[in-house]
Image: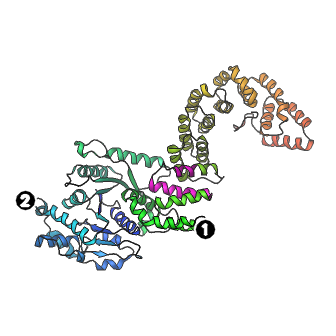
Amino acid sequence: MKTITFYSYKGGAGRTLAVANVAEYLSMFGQRVFALDFDLEAPGLHYKLTLTQPAKAGEIHQGVVDVICSFIAGRSTPASLSGYVVELSRPDDSYGPIWLMPAGRAPSAEYWRRLAQINWHDLFYTQNAPGVPFFLELKARIEDEFAPDFLLIDARTGITEHGGIATTLLPDEVVCLLLNNRENREGAREVLRGIRGAPRLTGQEPIGIHAVLSRLPRAAAPGPEERTLAEIRDFLNEPAPSLASTLAVPEVFVFHSDRDLEWSEGLRVGEAEGAEGPALLHDYLRLFARLIPRSVVEQRIRPLIENAERKVLRDPDGTQRDLEAFAAFYRHPEVLRPLLQLYLLKQADPEQLLKVAREFWETSRQANEPLLWRVVKTTAERWTTGRPVRADLRFMEEIWRTSGTADVGVAVRLASAYRALGDHGGAIRVLDHATRAHDFGDAAVVAPYLDVLVASKSWDKASEVVSAARSKLGENTEFLVAWVRLLLIKGDLAEIQAFLQDFQTVARLRGRAPLSVLELLVAAGRRQDAAAEATELLPQMLRHGLSEDAESLGSVFRSLGLWGQFESAVRAAFEPEEANRFLRFLSLEGRPTLRAPRRRPFLR
């Protein structure tokens, strides 16, 4: 029997609702669950566990307080605990049973009278105090009489005698919920340090500790939330006066606010609302995946999955429907994995694929799972023109950072998607990581990085990138064109003139992207050189048709006062109707001399 205590330093953190949800979740996997309400001063677990079967609340007549009072009166536990326990109804035999030992018949006057009669000092602090042996015996009696797989304890808030029993003596693991304020952080840390340093009985393993930040609003961008969770983790793990009490919390989980629960309280586990489900459900599942052994899940669903997989070749659509039904109901990584594999095999819609992959990641946090990298790479390569979703991008970025930084193509596509959402910060973050991962030596990522820095007017940062990449990419046309775009838009005359004085680079650029050189000459005020360059370029440019590059060249001729020369060349090279249409278009557009940067140079 595994014992998990749920604790919160202050009330209002959603502790009791979390206990009810994990009980429901374990039951779905056929586990036998015993839930114990140890929050005697503010009992509420019976309300949460009977949300879907309120008639059961009427069956509650006795509970923990009554067992304690019976022990105090006779110095022994009752012959049977069944009179103090309510068994909840289950949908069918495939569910495991849930037994509830409530605090008592709360909130009746008789309950409060009996609670007030308990002398906790005598129970715990007198010579040969019987409190500790009694609660150990109570736990053993629960195990012997009901044989649960899991004992879930809803513990009292704050610091109390029986709260200490629930958090230090009885559990194998403690889940501590806290709110994002100083009072909660400091109070929770002291309690957790006490749990960490508390002596254990012979043969007992150290208590596993899990911290959960609760009631956190969903942020529009992931950055603030990630920083908050990291700050709380670091705060909890600060050195304690005693080394034995110093915490080593690897991760702070989060339970987001659920506005629907403010209107009507309900359980989130067991809701079949499609592949995504409520946000709070995802949060629960992430924690449950850490608490519940993988064997528990596999024991329940492995036969179902294997049965579905056996028919995949003769009925792939039917297999998909089965796996989707399992995922909607169980929502566990071990169900989502085969569904993802099938989606990849069938080349499912990228949006559908990403939703399931993101849920797999959120519930398992296995960012290094090769299957997820396949999903991200496949999705990026098949990306449509549809508007990206920020949550998908953050997920894809996380997987790319973990498994795929060698693939700059995915990085560039991610950055492009961030820009489509107006999130230049996201694009810069991805491209900066990719650029540094490749030590500024890959133009395929450096060039778009310069573009996004230019678009966000991050001139100094862009100049730093140019300086770092120039020695490695000085002969790369894509890099040089991106550098020219920076110079033109930044408009620093000294920098433009310095570039033009590098005759070897200018000669290289003239042979591969001649318009870039021409635009630099115009920007530097070298009108005579620009006119000569434009005149020489005009015939070869028109041989490639009336393209965007031809438009740019026409704008340069106009700015130099040589429009007539350009117009005559166009009319000589093309049929009258085509030439008139193109020249009229340029006149109507009234394009400036220096157009927005192009993605590709004119010649390669």
Q: Amino acid at mark 2?
A: Gln
Q: In the displayed structure, does residue 161 sit left or right of residue 100?
A: left
Picture coordinates of residue 518 (x, y %)? 75, 28
Sequence-first disc among 2 and 1: 2
Image coordinates of residue 597 in percent, x first then y, are: 69, 37
Neighbours of disc 1 within 10 Å: few (<14), some (14-19), many (20+)? few
Which picture quadrant has residue 235? top left
Quarter of the N terminus within the rendering: bottom left
Residue topped by disc 1:
315
Residue 127: numbered disc: 2
Tag 1 secondary structure? loop
Task: Residue type at mark 1: give it.
Answer: Asp
Is 542 inside the magenta-drawn segment? Answer: no
Residue at 36% in and 63% down: 18
From the image, which quarter does the C terminus lie in? top right
- The 10 Å Cα crowd at callout 2, few under 14, some 14 to 19, many 20 or more, is few
Q: Nearer the viewer, mark 2 or mark 1?
A: 1
Q: Is residue 584 visible?
A: yes
Counting the numbered discs, the total is 2
Q: Main secondary structure of the magenta part?
A: helix
Residue pictured at 58% horizontal, 26% vertical = 467
**Residue at the farthest left position:** 127
Segment colored magenta: 347-376
